[in-house]
Amino acid sequence: MGTNQVRCEQRYEQRYEQWAAPLRGRPGVVRALNIVNRGIVVVFYAAYALLLGWACVSDPWRLVPLVGVTAVGFVAVSFFRRRFNAPRPYECCAIAALIARDGAGKSFPSRHAFSAFAIAASWFAASAPVAVVLLVAAVVLAICRVLGGVHFPRDVVVGALIGSVTGALAAFLAALL
């Protein structure tokens, strides 16, 4: 391992411990972090199902971009993650993650962040207020993933950017129909 990488990891370890230290001594807060992390994921499953239901009722052709564009983005992100296989913070840094996760690698970009931001941005085809609320929830999810120690900030930022572009494209194409 190179000297620069060791220094980088030590800096991240210090930074992460600054973020996590206020949470570590409070089991209830750590439990809440895990509940929020899982709960927001469920909210996004439901939000996507509702969006697809809206598309079926309003104009079934809208399903094509809302499902197709999002699916292509999801597959592309998954393929890239598998090929790039970036380590997770708890693998390459001496940190104790607050969110338990089985498995290693495939950290970059965050698929949770990608999916949340893609679904939130897709909602602009149906309802801007709902889309904005979901974007806020997506930001909270991204923060949970970093605070939980399962992603580096770059993982969630890149996942959020790719997801936002994917969702915006899906919403734009659905609005044209």
Image: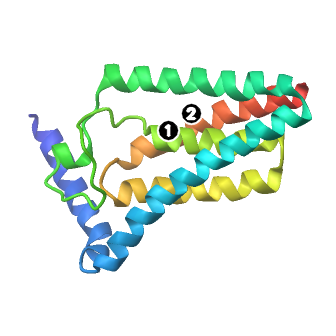
Q: Which of the 4 image quarters holds residue 66?
A: top right
- Is disc 1 in contact with disc 2, using a CB cutoff of under 8 Å? yes
Q: How far from the left and from the top, in percent, is residue 130?
A: 76, 54
Residue at left 45%, top 45%?
156
* Above/below status of 165 relative to 141: above
Q: Is residue 91 left or right of residue 16?
A: left
Residue at left 28%, top 32%?
86
* Above/below status of 58 relative to 14: above
Q: CA distance from mark 1 to mark 2?
A: 5 Å
Count all numbered tags in the image, as a single digit: 2
Q: Which of the 4 image quarters holds residue 6?
A: top left
| CA neighbours of label 1 inside 10 A, class few (<14), some (14 to 19), many (20+) | many
Residue topped by disc 2: 162
Q: Which of the 4 image quarters holds residue 62?
A: top right
Residue topped by disc 1: 159
Amino acid type, residue under disc 1 in the picture: Gly
Q: How far from the left and from the top, in percent, is residue 23?
A: 31, 74
Q: Is residue 114 left or right of residue 99?
A: right
Quadrant location of the C terminus in the rendered image: top right
Q: How far from the left and from the top, in percent, is residue 150?
A: 31, 49
| CA neighbours of label 2 inside 10 A, class few (<14), some (14 to 19), many (20+) | many
Amino acid type, residue under disc 2 in the picture: Ile
SS at badge 1: helix
